[in-house]
Image (tube, helix red, strand yellow):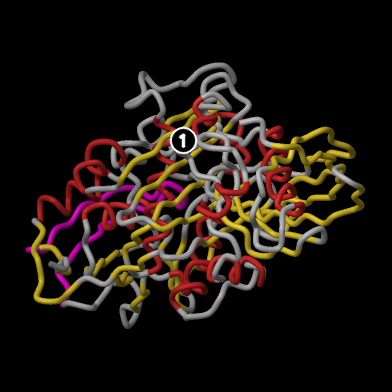
Amino acid sequence: MNDKQKTIAKEASFSGVGLHTGSLTTVTFKPAPPDTGIVFYRVDLPEKPAIPADIDHVVDVSRGTTVGVGDARVHTVEHCMAALNGLGIDNLIIELDADEMPNGDGSALPVMSTLLRAGLTEQDAERQYIVVDRPVYYRQDDVTLNVLPSDELRVTMTIAYDHVAIGTQYASFTITEETFRNQIAPARTFCFLREVKMLQDAGLIQGGSLESAVVIGDEAILNDELRFPDEMVRHKILDLIGDTYLLGRRLKGHIIGVKCGHEKNVMFSKQIKKFYGNGAEAAIIRDYKVSSLRQKPVLDVNQIMKMLPHRYPFLLVDRILAFERLKRATGIKNVTVNEPYFQGHWPDIPVMPGVLIIEAMAQVSAVLVFGDNGEPNGQVAFFMGVEKARFRRTVVPGDQLVIETEMVHWRHNAYKAKAVALVDGTVAAEAVMTFSLLENPV
């Protein structure tokens, strides 16, 4: 049975100071009819302008997410949007008498507690989801955000800071109402003490204090205690849950993020909207990527296992998309967080080992030497050497390696091939490999 849309049972309010503007704000939540979505109203302004809470109305991402229409703004909406997403609220009117959501303790608890006090109620309308059936990738510098197919909303996050009090943190949660309420909503925003003056000079965190955030000094956390040992990465998950809810619908997909923040969250959400919301492919997803997800394989995994002796956990090719004997081949390796080597390389910041990228490239290259029908004829390709190996970028869970290999030359049973492994059209690794074709000793 499909889920029903939800709103709140009655009106509820709370007041507080905005983190960045320092504005004293009273926010009032009101029930809304089915298919209304989430709409902010600035009741302190003439004509009480409405500001839809959607990705097209994001106007600023400076240390928070701001939505606006014309001159009307609502700053720092991400914690509120996270609470709505986590509680499964589809339709809501939010009235504010100032320009920023109250910050409270820097978590989603103030909003969530107010909404739970009002009570949640189902509506006579079916909930619509964004169901991820094809991956969407976003990458800029060392920030990556991917969403993979899943029957539920799951968020996996890795952060890394050069600070003894944080270091590298990793967390992964399936986002249910219970999980959100107990594991995500209490996580507070955080900032570094050394940044405070710079932010204040920029007109930000005018309402900041030790009661409104986790403040990190040069060597230690200044607050009395953390709510979770990994509170910082949990708050990054909270922000991402809020920012992606600006898509207007809940996601069914597995989001994997590394070192992301509001700006990248919003760009990623726009990417998802282009891919799913408008029925068009995202501009930065290369043609080969889209076609590789849809194209019928020349060799499926069952045929590959007839050609290669490798088995779990060392079969590193999922499909062969193109295959011309002794000329060229194209194969795919989908990298998931369930790969066994991520348990040790490394648990806190999973990165695919370079030697295994080379192995995947070698396995695709081995396909080049077999017969036109893809049959090994009792022979096995043995890896003999590697030259000019270069690693251009890291490969992490959620990436898809597209491996293109081309025969350089061959004679009798000695072969040399050049292979390139790409992620999102960018070279991740390249190498020239030599191997021999020998009789299978088994």
Q: Is residue 242 above or below residue 394?
A: below
Q: Position of residue 331 (x, y in %)?
A: 65, 56
Mark 1: which amino acid? Phe
Left or right? Give the position of 393 relative to 290.
right
Left or right? Give the position of 328 relative to 239.
right
- Is residue 283 on the magenta stretch? no
Q: Is residue 261 above or below residue 243?
A: above
Q: Which residues are magenta?
A: 9-33
Q: Position of residue 10 (x, y in %)?
A: 8, 63
Question: Which image quarter: residue 211?
Answer: top left
Front residue of 353/361: it is 361
Q: Position of residue 141 (x, y in %)?
A: 69, 49
Front residue of 320/373: it is 373
Dot 1: element: strand
- Taking the spot 38% from the left edge, 46% from the top edge, the residue there is 238
- Is residue 10 on the magenta stretch? yes
Q: Which residue is mark 1?
A: 190
Left or right? Give the position of 82 relative to 237.
left
Q: Quadrant of the N terminus?
A: bottom left
Q: Position of residue 79 (x, y in %)?
A: 35, 51
